[in-house]
Image (cartoon, helix red, strand yellow):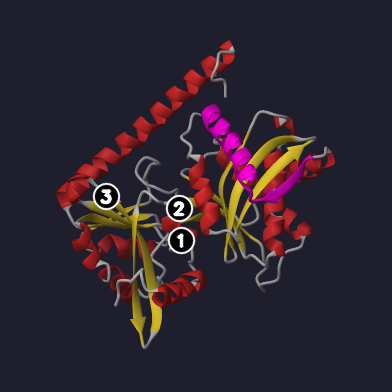
């Protein structure tokens, strides 16, 4: 059956083995990601020939009012993108799910480099809407630009620490060395206490930068879904926690998923050392790459871009092909397309308002200080 039977352990194991070994594998295409995104439903489809899986697509199902839904394959499908017929086949396998869930659209945004020929082909497909060049951060779910540091050379040999440091710019190298010299250490674990400390720092950062953050339970679900592959890093100095991060080693692809820092000893720049130690941890595990996460624009004035670029100078920026909607209901798709940017801006405004209110309370020294 092209639609995966999620109640069949043998079928799930076979599907999962394909996903984990695929060149375009992504943690968000693993079936266990469905447990992390507990507010979504989950489905999966695949293409098989002669008893061998050739392509797969794990889908999250977001319910909408009126019995409709959105199907979303984050960083999928997993397919040879040079084989256009196979791409169409794996998407066609999702048609029973489109009917089952009354899907308005099927959305996908694979970890595939932008290519003009591929872009033209995607745009030539009837009923497909492609969002890449010119799309703003309110138009897409995930950033189009990613910063990925290769942890192996071209022959597949793990880098030495000096070779890794050579990929950073001179500022990042100096910050790593200075943080070590001044006594910053990076501990790694995965206990409830590690997650609590991480979340405290992460939410502090969210309030400081006026951005939305996730609840603590979300990070417990990540750890519990990938217990042997998740690490919580804590950058510390003389007993004080300065920064923390949650990273998943997805079968050789490390994802720097969430991180934050507080205002304690910020001059020590602990984030550079923390990322360096996480990459060294990956090298010790035989990992291929370290994904620092994405940015929406290559803006030199953006501190996040500036920070990530300092560590990924040697490998540069990866521009992805973008986000594609296969439209099943034109009217509702148009309505969602108009509404999504408004919802995103409203969420940011609410988050900023809450953050400013908390800052005012803290400044007055009233109860509720964060």
Residue 336, position as x, y percentages in the image: 24, 44
| SS label for mark 2 | helix
The image shows residue 116, relative to residue 236, as above or below, that is: below
Marks 1 and 3, the one that precedes in the sequence: 1
Task: Single out the residue that lies furthest toward the bottom.
Answer: 50
Indicate the secondary structure of the residue bearing disc 1.
loop
Give the residue at x 29% y 77%.
Answer: 1
Q: Which residues are magenta?
A: 184-209
> Cβ–Cβ below 8 Å for labels 1 and 2?
yes
What residue lies at 48% left-to-right and 46% top-to-bottom? Answer: 218
- Is residue 231 rendered magenta in the image? no
Give the CA separation, mark 1 to mark 2.
7 Å
Q: Which residue is mark 2?
A: 36
Classify 10 Å Cα crowding around label 2: few (below 14), some (14-19), many (20 and above).
Answer: many
Residue in the picture at 52% in, 41% down: 216
Image quadrant in which the C terminus is located: top right
Q: Which residue is found at the position 30% from the left and 51% from the top?
A: 62
**Front position in the image: 105 or 131:** 105
Comparing 184 with 100, the one in front is 100
Instruction: Write down the residue under mark 1.
Output: 32
Of residues 32 and 24, the one drawn nearer to the viewer in this rendering: 32
The residue singled out by tag 3 in the image is 63
Residue 178 in sight in this render:
yes
Residue 355 place in picture, x, y as percent: 49, 24
């Amino acid at each position: 059956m092209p639609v995966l039977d999620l109640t069949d352990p043998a079928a799930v194991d076979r599907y999962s083995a394909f996903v984990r070994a695929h060149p375009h594998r992504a943690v968000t295409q693993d079936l266990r990601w469905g447990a992390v995104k507990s507010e979504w439903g989950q489905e999966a489809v695949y293409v098989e020939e002669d008893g061998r899986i050739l392509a797969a697509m794990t889908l999250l199902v977001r319910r909408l009012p009126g019995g409709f839904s959105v199907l979303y394959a984050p960083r999928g499908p997993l397919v040879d993108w040079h084989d256009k017929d196979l791409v169409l086949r794996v998407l066609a396998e999702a048609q029973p799910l489109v009917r089952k869930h009354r899907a308005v659209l099927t959305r996908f945004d694979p970890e595939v480099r932008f290519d003009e020929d591929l872009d033209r082909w995607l745009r030539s497909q009837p009923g497909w809407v492609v969002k890449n060049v010119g799309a703003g951060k309110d138009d897409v779910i995930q950033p189009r630009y990613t910063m990925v540091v290769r942890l192996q050379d071209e022959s597949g040999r793990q880098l030495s620490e000096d070779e890794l440091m050579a990929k950073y710019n001179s500022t990042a190298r100096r910050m790593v060395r200075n943080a070590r010299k001044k006594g910053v250490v990076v501990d790694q674990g995965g206990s409830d206490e590690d997650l609590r400390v991480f979340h405290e720092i992460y939410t502090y950062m969210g309030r400081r930068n006026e951005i939305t953050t996730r609840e603590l339970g979300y990070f417990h679900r990540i750890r519990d879904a990938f217990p042997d592959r998740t690490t919580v890093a804590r950058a510390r100095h003389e007993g004080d926690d300065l920064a923390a991060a949650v990273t998943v080693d997805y079968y050789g692809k490390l994802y720097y998923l969430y991180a934050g820092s507080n205002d304690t000893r910020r001059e020590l720049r602990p984030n550079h050392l923390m990322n360096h130690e996480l990459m060294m941890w990956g090298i010790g595990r035989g990992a291929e790459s370290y994904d620092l996460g994405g940015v929406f624009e290559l803006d030199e004035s953006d501190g996040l871009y500036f920070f990530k670029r300092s560590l990924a100078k040697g490998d540069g920026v990866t521009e992805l092909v973008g986000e594609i909607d296969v439209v099943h209901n034109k009217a509702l798709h148009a309505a969602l397309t108009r509404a999504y940017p408004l919802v995103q801006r409203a969420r940011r405004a609410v988050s900023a308002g809450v953050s400013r209110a908390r800052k005012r309370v803290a400044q007055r020294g009233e109860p509720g200080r964060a």
